[in-house]
Image (cartoon, rainbow, N blue to C red):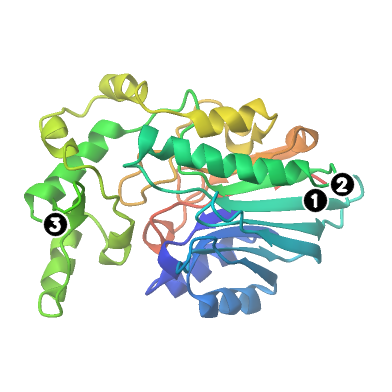
Amino acid sequence: MTYNVLYGGRQRESLIRGVLERADADVIALQEVTELSLLNSLASRLGMDAVVGEPSETGSDMRIAILSRRPIRSWRNERHRGRMLRSHLHCEIDTGGADIPVVAVHCVHLAARFAERAKGEARRIRELNAVTEGIARLPVQPHLLMGDFNSLTAGDTVAATRFFRRYNEMRRAGLVVNGPDGNMVLLTRDGTNDEAVDAAFRAAGVDERLIAGIPMLPRVVAPLTSSVPVSPGLDRFLGRFIERWTMERVHSLGYHDAFRRTHPRAHGFTVATWLPAARVDYVLTSPDLAQRVVDSDVIGSRTWPDPDAATASDHFPVVADIAV
């Protein structure tokens, strides 16, 4: 299972715990682990061991982590300073399986810098290259590469027009405003307006605990999208202008997408829970595990409903069953 818990899961700890307990995964890759107390609590409650990857970016608390119910043989956190904002956390896990007794698990969280070159793909592919070069230096073994890639796969659609409509509704409501750096920013609380701001976001369909996950888009997006109609055909057209270098590189290296292998046509949107519009979270297998994928799904979707997934984070978790 891979799960971005949004800034450490603040004020959503019990919801996240419930989602994880019901999923009952043997191995969980977590992103945005800012609260180590939550990680330790989850590990204790779930009966799992935890390893943590400190970020590369100076001053950041955006950690990644791996929880495992099976014994962890070894682990290492590669920070790739100067090449990654977060890090590349990996470990070897005893599966207890007869055919595949040991699997390596690699957890990543690639940068969400959508205002940069190629909507951030230039940075993300540099980060991915650092990760895959590190994997190539390790002994060859069955492994999983999973996490929040912040990137689309070729052929996947994005509900761009529905997203732009919601974003512009928030802009017109004064919840998204022009910032000083050319980007739009969120209306900030000042200690006297907190309840009013939270209520306004709820009225716009966003749980106030998930506000931090609303992306900051370039200011020019507002006038360009203010009158765009909601249209699947237009979504497909706009999708052609979204660079997909990162996931193209992933597939060129032979990795298999567990969800797409079991759901050839489903959207599988993982973000945002308040408006599902894109699939950016993946469980990827090395070629020797691809045929062993039994099933994969998005928790909180129609095929795997969960009562808390829509408010526990701004990401839906992705799970995969792999026979070992």
**Separation of disc 1 and disc 3 at Cα?**
46 Å
Disc nearest the viewer among 2 and 3: 3
Residue 180 sits in quarter? bottom left
Q: Which mark is residue 66?
A: none
129 or 289, which is in the foreground? 129
Q: Is label 2 in contact with label 3 (beta carbons under 8 Å)?
A: no
Q: Which residue is drawn at 29% across and 53% down?
A: 214
- Residue displayed at 83% across by 46% down: 324
Q: Please state the horizontal and vertical placement of residue 311, each as a whole percent of the image.
A: 37, 61
Q: To which residue does mark 3 refer? A: 175
Contact, CB < 8 Å: mark 1 with mark 2? Answer: yes
Q: Which structural element holds mark 3?
A: loop
Q: x and y percent of residue 321 in the render?
A: 69, 46
Task: Tell which of 211 and 62 is nearer to you.
Answer: 62
In the image, residue 46 sits, relative to residue 96, either above or below, namely: below
Amino acid type, residue under disc 3 in the picture: Leu
Residue position marked by numbered label 2 in the rendering: 100
